[in-house]
Amino acid sequence: MADRLLGKRIFLTGAAQGIGFAIAQACLAEGAKLFLVDLDGPLLKKTVAGLAAPQGHIGYVAADISNGKAIAAAVRRADNEIGPINALINNAGVNVFSTPLKASEKEWNRNFDVNVKGAWNCCKAILPGMIASGGGAILNIASTHSFTIIPHTFPYPVAKHALLGLTRSLALEYAGQGVRVNALAPGYVETQKVTDYWNSLADPAAARAKTLALHPGGRIASTREIAMAAVFMISEECPFMNAACLVVDGGLSQLQHPA
């Protein structure tokens, strides 16, 4: 076990699969204690059972991050189980893709309830304890949708742009109290959901090849690559990084035209 995160007690949302699960694995390997939250209770329980964690290093609860009372209760439970939270990783999110005039009010509300309000609920519940103890680190998992637009993905990028605004606002508001707030913006990542999407198409291999060909390096990120970037940003290796957004997309967002 390495020790880059010794002393960190991390509240991690969307932890049951994909990027969240990879972050949980990486943080545990670096000595952190974790409290995991996910909407899918059975999957979360299975995930926790599969994590190699020392006794007392992991707690969990199924909760809807869009429910402020549920998150406040989860934070109280986390404080009791692993100790006062000094790091938060807002990873939970939901893809809501449509076009502006076809997106329903239900889709709009779900998009913002999870992708923005959910992150704020967690920050609001955890910030007082961080401030009282002299500081902490918050990392919001954003997306390259936070500063670029892909047609027909409305209103998802609207919420992700707002998540960057939340990140910067909180970062400047609480820097003087020792809290730093940053964002991490992955591009395409090879998660199970992405693989399932490729497999839903007529020619999965061609769909995968098309996605990879968009990227300057001809590949997309692994979940571990995103997780290790998260470890760095939560660690004390970047104590003066605040209100920043680290982009991990292989250079895709800087490419003006595909080759």
Image (cartoon, rainbow, N blue to C red):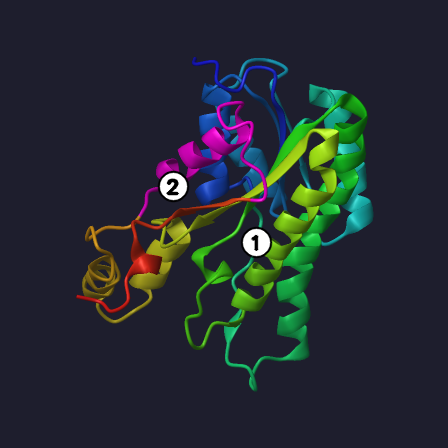
- Quarter of image, res 188: bottom left
Residue located 62% across and 60% down the image: 162
Q: Position of residue 216 (x, y in %)?
A: 21, 55
Secondary structure found at label 1: loop
Residue sitting at the far bottom: 101
Is residue 184 shown to the viewer in this render? yes
Position of the C terminus by quadrant: bottom left
The residue range painted magenta reads 221-243
Side of 11 where 229 appears, left or right: left
Mark 2 and mark 1 lie on one chain; the one further toward the N terminus is 1
Is residue 64 shown to the viewer in this render? no
Side of 23 where 188 appears, left or right: left
Residue that numbered label 1 is attached to: 93
Does the magenta run of residues contain 232?
yes
Give the number of the disc on residue 223. Answer: 2
Secondary structure found at label 2: helix
Residue located 82% across and 46% down the image: 69
Q: How many marks?
A: 2
Q: Position of residue 22 (x, y in %)?
A: 44, 35
Relative to 32, is 114 above or below?
below
State the residue in front, 58 or 5.
5
Relative to 187, is 87 above or below?
above
Position of the N terminus by quadrant: top left
Residue located 78% across and 40% down the image: 125
Q: Residues within 10 Å of mark 1 (few under 14, many from 20)?
A: many
Residue type, numbered disc 1: Gly
Q: Position of residue 198 (x, y in %)?
A: 30, 62
Relative to 131, is 151 above or below?
below
